[in-house]
Amino acid sequence: MVLDTVMKTKTTIKEVAELAGVSFKTVSRVINNEGSVRKETLQKVNDAISELNYQPNNAARNLAGNKSYSLGYVYDNPNAYYVLDMQNGILAECRERGYELVIHPCSANNKHIVDELATMIKRSQLAGLIISPPLSEMPEVLSGLDAMNIPFIRIISASEVSQESSPCVYINDRDAAFDITEHLIEQGHTKIAFLRGDDNHRSSHERKIGYLNALKKHDISINEDYQIDGSYSFEFGVQGAKQLLSLSEPPTGIFSCNDEIAAGALFAVRLQGLNVPDDMAIAGFEDSPFSRQTWPMLTTAAQPTNTIARKAAASLIQHLVHLRSPKTSVDSIPHLHYRPQLVKRESTLSVPSK
Amino acid sequence: MVLDTVMKTKTTIKEVAELAGVSFKTVSRVINNEGSVRKETLQKVNDAISELNYQPNNAARNLAGNKSYSLGYVYDNPNAYYVLDMQNGILAECRERGYELVIHPCSANNKHIVDELATMIKRSQLAGLIISPPLSEMPEVLSGLDAMNIPFIRIISASEVSQESSPCVYINDRDAAFDITEHLIEQGHTKIAFLRGDDNHRSSHERKIGYLNALKKHDISINEDYQIDGSYSFEFGVQGAKQLLSLSEPPTGIFSCNDEIAAGALFAVRLQGLNVPDDMAIAGFEDSPFSRQTWPMLTTAAQPTNTIARKAAASLIQHLVHLRSPKTSVDSIPHLHYRPQLVKRESTLSVPSK
């Protein structure tokens, strides 16, 4: 077929075994990451693999053991930077471990989302899934996947050691949002508004709780007019800031649920001739390129999406290895925790004029 | 195995054939898009497929006919919006035609790029590739893929009906850049600078030729100081604009090779307290979200990346169908042409003060 030229140069697992001076089965264990191989033996096999440029063929692996070496990444997110960071983090781990990645963007509003996922899993014969918000936070998706009995790991927004039964990477949005709000308070602000992201993302709610917690801790009265619900978009940032500026007593600081909203708020505030941060301090969340390409640059919370994605993939693969070879020590996917870190920049670094 | 729950409900091709009242082979022809099926028969089979919710299983298809139903998309591009638009366009076509997509970000600077692609094609058993710039414009990649005898389609920047032997989607950057420059001239500008993107992207050179062509057509003398080479990044836009503003006779208009550069230039110009467009007109290229999230919004050229990607995938799949079933009428991948369209916005819409 079309791949003749490539196929001719194919190294076999037998050649690897011969060069390494080990059995066929040992090479197979190494290739499939099954552990239980001595360090020196592992080294010999890996050296032979490098020398012969051996590449496990997934179709062959699948046929031989009726096992799949494909992971799926399922997402519905308008944030291009987030999605690419997630893809690249997962791919980095997949490449190292000899897995493939099937990407599956879809709509959280699709009423048949569970059927759609079932079809994809079946068609692509996936070994496991990585799911990001908001899909990862939808109960019907969770129960649907449980019924399909497919291993998966979810990235979710959660503040404490949670009661989740299925494997998760927890992003502690709540405490990071607390840090940002407290930073604004420390800069002298008491009139602080909050522009919230989409209702179907838990992060919107967690970040809002963090904001409210900081106000409470510092005995700042809560003003309902300063809390506007919207979506994770530049456009909402523009509209939300305009609404805040039209109040008889506008805030002096705006904490936006992500950097896109913050960039939009900045746009609207400057359009009215106001100075940032002197007339209005503005903070975002995520540390996306948006936060560094505004003038002034945005205070935000850095979320290491690429690392989170890679760790999630590593964790899932470790679990798949265990399913194939229960002798390995890990028997369930460990929970992972990340707390985004405050990054102070010019958009908040001054004392308000009033 | 893990997919038991899903597998139990699997509809077979035989059930589809029975419901449609046709042979197994006819259903197979429909599923594999092999043409040569009468319209009424096609309708009957498709109705049966819908009613039974039949989903072709790619592994089964591959085994049955030793054929692959996976496409690969190979890219090296820092522009998140471009990459996601490409992915989503290709995926839309893949879903409709029952293909899978394997994404493969890689580095154009990798000296072993051809080996890397060969490994990927082999490992994932790809049927064909879609390649975007700059990889699609590198002679070594082209000759490497030719040697592997794998069908592929490239997105490239080219102004005329080109002499390319392999299938391409041509993006006419040159003429679109001409349009933007001419628009600046029509706004009264004669001192127009050009901030160029990466050297290894043909689009950088094509857009520069378009810029120079417009100046020539309007008898505007060419000033070398107004032409700065850089990269497709916000940071270069900032740095390039600063350099232009430090000239003893700065330009009154800046045409930036893409919207990110333009957003950076806008940032730098406004940082110096200048008004856009009155003191400095700025235009970008691509019509990415960058161009609509600046103040003022950017004049640019709209490039329908999602459509381009989808058409490229459709064209490649059509070719693969032909390879399997040479009776179909299409015997080679047709060339496709796109010319990005001028979008006029506030960042250029005024007459310069000098």
Image (cartoon, coloured by chain):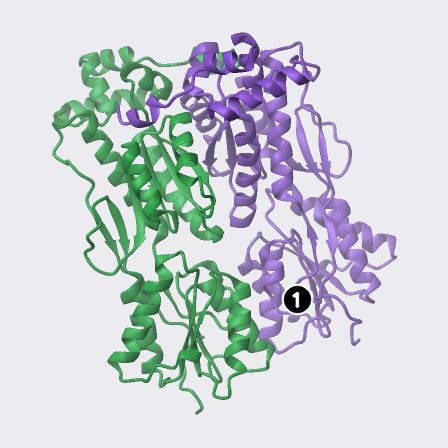
Chain colours: A purple, B green
> Label 1 marks which chain's residue?
A
- Residue at x 27% of width, y 74% of height: B213
Q: Nearer the viewer, residue B199 or B171?
A: B199
Does residue B275 appear anywhere in the picture?
no
Looking at the rendered structure, the secondary structure element under dot 1 is helix
Q: Is residue A228 above or below residue A11?
A: below
Which residue: 61% across, 42% down? Answer: A306
Q: Which residue is mark 1?
A: A244
Residues A117 and B20: in front is A117
- The residue closer to the viewer here, A336 or B38, is A336
Tell me the quadrant of the picture where the C terminus of chain B can be found: bottom left
How crowded pointer 1 is (Cα within 10 Å; few <14, some 14-19, many 20+) is rated as many
Q: Position of residue A205 (x, y in %)?
A: 68, 45
Classify residue A45 by image quadrant.
Answer: top right
Residue B24 on image: x %, y %: 21, 12
Q: Is residue B7 visible?
A: yes
Amino acid on which disc 1 is placed: Leu
